[in-house]
Amino acid sequence: MRDVVRLEGDDRVIASLADAARRAVARADARSWLTELGSIGTLRRTVMHQMVQGSAPAAAPVKEEREPASGARSGGPWWTALVLGAAAALVGAAALLPPRRSQVVELDFVMGFAPVALAAGATALAALAILPVPSAPRRTAYAAGLAAMTSVLAVAAVVVSAFRVDDMVAASSVASTTTWFAAAAVAVLASLVIALRARPRRGATSTAPGWRDGAREAKRRALALERGIPADRAAEVGSRWAAELERLAPELPPEARSQAAELGPWRWLVWAYYDGETELPHPLARA
């Protein structure tokens, strides 16, 4: 699917050119086309509103939505620490679960790495349980789900291992066995804290897919509308558009005028109404 066209100029320029474009096409037989254009504009404004409501904090919705996301705000380092910590904890815990009948795993081999892996994972999870949770992980249930899964598996490993403490001590040492159980307890508690703190905010999970679907639908319809430009009174529309651009020339930035001339009034209207940020009248309103 082709990319959308980003129009040059600020809101004032776009509004002025929108009025000029509507005057240029006013005599063409294009009522159904303009009706669809108005519908796309309404859909885009709804999408923009849902994006702000679903993605930005209540205290400063517009600022949060439009600021470039830093690594901390987007949760990149936090996600990395969670995945690595959970992976290490899962390896250290799962190693002590009973093997399948087709597998034979020596306990002394397992105790050679399981306490270290589980301790490393528990340390990372404990740090995440204390540090603030970025906003990005709270927009989905993945972080909370991963933490909850880690906690459940660690609990299962502790329950199973409680029945063979003597074997674990014999295979390694009291210190290694104690380290494993202590790390397992920390991993369970830290994972539960993370699961609670990283759970999706109310409305975030249900709103985000909605605006994404709406955004895709608006883009699809805009591109279809661009391909179906009315051919009625083409010469008259072109001459009226050129006259409007000439009249507005003193107040138009050169790049905006050049783009408007290249696109023509019909295509320019498509992307002006698709933009969704500039307040424009309905396409069928008298210009």
Image (cartoon, grey):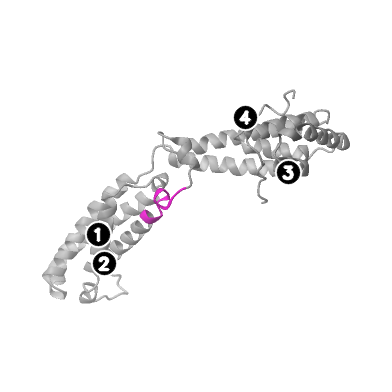
In three-dimensional space, the C-alpha distance between marks 3 and 2, rounded to whole angstroms, equals 60 Å
Between residue 80 and residue 97, name the one nearer to us: 80
Give the mark, 3 or 2, whose residue is nearer the N terminus: 2
Tell me how far mark 1 sits from mark 3, CA to CA.
57 Å
Residue beneath disc 3: 259
65, 164: nearer the viewer: 65
Give the left or right position of residue 229, taking residue 144 as reference: right
Q: Residues within 10 Å of mark 1 (few under 14, many from 20)?
A: some
Q: Give the structural element (helix, strand or loop) at label 2.
A: helix
- Label 1's element? helix
Residue at image coords 84%, 34%: 237
The disc at residue 117 is 2
Q: Is residue 75 visible?
A: yes
For disc 3, the neighbor class at 10 Å (few under 14, some 14 to 19, many from 20) is some
Instruction: Work out whether residue 39 can be spotted.
Output: no
For label 4, count other residues whose C-alpha is less than 10 Å away and answer few (under 14), some (14-19) or many (20+).
some
Q: Are marks 3 and 2 in contact (CB under 8 Å)?
A: no
Residue type, mark 3 in image: Gln
Of labels 4 and 2, the one closer to you? 4
Q: Quadrant of the C terminus?
A: top right
Question: Which of the numbered marks, if any, corresponds to residue 242?
Answer: none
**Mark 4 vs 1: CB contact within 8 A:** no
The label on residue 123 is 1
From mark 2 to mark 1, how far is it between C-alphas? 10 Å
The secondary element bearing badge 3 is classed as: helix
- Looking at the rendered structure, the kind of residue marked 4 is Glu
Q: Earlier in the sequence, mark 4 or mark 1?
A: 1
Q: Measuring from the top left, give residue 117's x and y in whole percent.
A: 26, 67
Stretch of the chain drawn in magenta? 69-78
Question: 116 above or below 23?
Answer: below
Three-letter residue code for mark 2: Ala
Mark closer to the chain start, 3 or 4? 3
